[in-house]
Image (cartoon, rainbow, N blue to C red):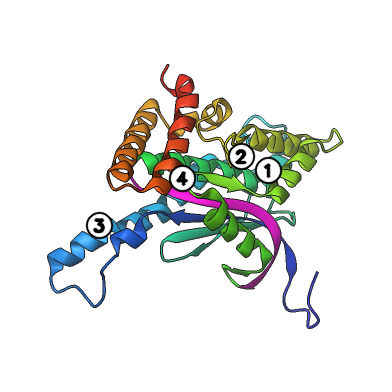
Amino acid sequence: MTNSDDRLIVQNYAAAFIDLLGQRAALEGCELTPNSKEEFIKIAKQSIDAIQNLHSQFNDFYSAINQGPDSSRVKPEHRELHLRMKRTQLKFQRFSDGLFSYISLVPNANHLPINGIYGLISSCGALCFVGLASGQPIRGGLDIAWGVELNQNELYGCVVARAYQLESEAAKFPRIVLGNEMMNYLHQYANMPGQDLEVQYVRTMATTCLDMIHQDIEDGLFCIDYLGEKFRQYIGSTVDNQVFHDARTFIRAQLERFQAVDDKKLFDRYKILDKYFESRQYIWMQ
């Protein structure tokens, strides 16, 4: 739909808001420009490098994961459809210590929305996992709602608020929480009727996305199951067992740190995260 002057197009978007945790502590006490180059480098290593890594890693994961089907053996009459299945139109907005990624849910000749949703789920999950292993934890929210693109890579509307709310209020510790509209969308397309090639592809991709999601037993929220069997099956070529070991080591170090300073809130949150790793250990430590 459009507004009264037909300039702003309102449509539904899928969006992910990713926040890099720990940046407030890294910048605590900063005021004016540091007095020495050494002091600046120390601050930069703790904050600026981590933010740049977040942006580049997300782009790398998304590009690697969202390749789509191989068209080399496809019949000529089906090749254009398969090429369309590879395409997506992901866009980014960068914040000081976060990243907002989104895609329109309106399909066109160059864009099949389910590709973008698969890319968002798989890359956000991989980023959360690898972030723990590298000592740069993230948390995030992913949902669907309406939005208006005011300018190129500048989205406004309910979808921005929903993704941010899930990240800031629901996620609470390193995990990616999915909203109800995202879950409804995936279930709708996983059960889409029809047998033509495009419908079969969309149905399979939606089912694949659902395979990479679980309901957290602690609070009932739906989260990306980045340690699950299906997630490992789909993105296993990009993550190995050492990442699991390094992430677990980081989590236990955080538990010791928060216990030492008597921070019960963060200790309890990382304890839940440690229990999640314990429940998936059999998948990664074979």
Q: Earlier in the sequence, mark 4 or mark 3?
A: 3
| Residue 162 coordinates in the image, percent (x, y) | 63, 59
Q: Which residue in the structure is indicated by mark 4?
A: 174
Residue that appears at 43% across and 48% down: 265
Give SS at disc 4: loop
Residue 45's label in the rendered image is 3
Decide: few, some or many residues near mark 1? Use Cα within 10 Å; few <14, some 14-19, many ≥20: many
Q: Nearer the viewer, residue 61 or 143?
A: 143
- Amino acid of disc 2: Gly
* Span of residues in magenta: 134-150
**Residue corresponding to mark 2:** 68
Q: Is residue 208 magenta?
A: no
**Residue positioned most to the bottom:** 5
Q: Earlier in the sequence, mark 1 or mark 2?
A: 2
Query: Between marks 1 and 4, how big is the CA–CA gap?
Result: 31 Å
Q: Gap between marks 1 and 3, in whole Å?
A: 40 Å
Query: What residue is drawn where x is 20% and y is 60%?
Result: 42
Between discs 1 and 4, the one toward the N terminus: 1
Q: Residues under labels 4 and 3: Cα distance?
A: 21 Å
Residue 173 seen anywhere in this rendered image of the structure: yes
Tell me the residue that label 1 is attached to: 85
286 vs 235, left or right, is: left
Question: Which element is circle 2 on?
Answer: loop
The N terminus: image quadrant:
bottom right
Q: Is residue 112 visible?
A: no
Tag 1 and tag 2, C-beta contact below 8 Å: yes
- Spot occupied by residue 236 in the image (x, y as percentages of width and height): 48, 29
**Which quarter of the figure is the C terminus placed in?**
top left
Report the Cα–Cα distance between label 1 and label 2: 6 Å
